[in-house]
Amino acid sequence: MLTLGMLRFELERCGCCISVIIWFYLPRNVASTQGGLRGFTPRFTHRQVQIAVTRVIRDDQKRVTRADFKDAATDLGLWGHLLLANVTLTPTSPLGTYLPTVIKSFHFNVFVSNALTAPPYVLQCIIMVIVIWHSDKVRERGFHGAFGSAWQLVGWIILRAMPDKASRGIKYFGAVVVASWPSNHPLNIGWMSENTASIGKRTVASGAVIFAANIYAVWASQIYQADDAPYFKRGNSINIAFAGFATILWMVQKYYYRHLNKKHEHAYAASSEEERLEEDSQTEKKGNRSLTFRYTT
């Protein structure tokens, strides 16, 4: 019979084996995608390789300027994505830190508590991939992101409203619901990137969102307190507030981009032929502030 220590060792060994396989499976670059575990058929045509290499060379010549920082700092849409990263991820920190403790408080032994921590995250991975795939298929972001936060909100409400004397199965069900929420942080990053047109501005935005996606842990780590254990009623009330606010923010961000699209369309339609030609020639320079740019919503 495997002990907990032996099981952890086996899992680590499996992880190392998978890492080695992935190392040999992933291509070295866009022009070298065949051979070994990858098979003998190239993944890209000669034309696709030319396009990819040209894009890399072109983008590498760009430099981040002071104007890019100014453009990013005055973009309300970008600030919305930074706020989304902060608010959406905040409730995940206490759950990720204390989920084994919460499950253990259901009076399972240590081995079972650790084993029961895995299924919610497997479900989360599967559901997240499905939601993001569907988002790309229909070219919609706001409703899909709000769906993820709403899922998390329902989970926190279940945990908060659950009576202390509820059965272990019901308590575990509540923990599974909140932990298996389809994480919408990747969706937020992709949404921000496609709505930030210029390369320099996108570089600044990427750095800013990384900061926003890490600084939240400063206050998130204080949500669950020792005097609130083992069911963390007060902490879960705070998590409900964050998840509810995140759901609203996703909708606000969506309709803000819709407003900008309508504003651009009306301004472009009202301009003269000469102004349109001038605007078309300035599309790359103006980025997402151009009247010809259409935001993904």
Image (tube, helix red, strand yellow):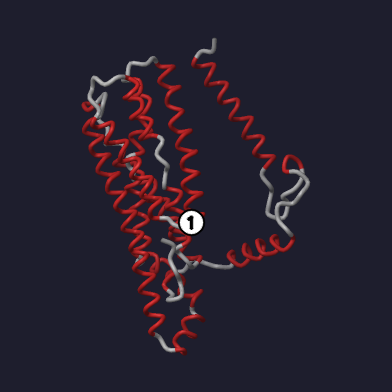
Residue drawn at x 35%, y 35% as measured from the top left: 178
Q: Position of residue 134 (x, y in %)?
A: 49, 50
Quadrant position of residue 20:
top right
37 above or below 292? above
Q: Residue at x 73, y 58 (%)?
A: 45
Please tell me in which quadrant of the rendered image residue 50 appears: bottom right
The correct choice, above or below, for 113 with respect to 206 in the image is: above
SS label for mark 1:
helix
Q: Position of residue 157 (x, y in %)?
A: 27, 36
Vertical comparison of 109 with 217: above or below = above
What is the residue that sits farthest to the top in this orientation? 1
Residue bearing mark 1: 138
Quarter placement of the C terminus? bottom left
Instruction: Return the x and y of residue 197 as percentages of the image width and height.
Output: 48, 67
**Which amino acid type is marked by label 1?**
Val
Instruction: Choose between 278 and 70: the one closer to the eye.
Output: 278
- Which residue sits at x=35%, y=52%? 84
Q: Quadrant of the N terminus?
A: top right
Question: Residue 59 at what x, y percent from top left?
Answer: 58, 65
**Residue at image coords 38%, 30%:** 176
Residue 43 left/right relative to 205:
right
Label 1 environment density (alpha carbons within 10 Å; few <14, some 14–19, many ≥20):
few
Left or right side of 4 for 241: left
Question: With 141 as the anchor, is 91 left or right in this view?
Answer: left
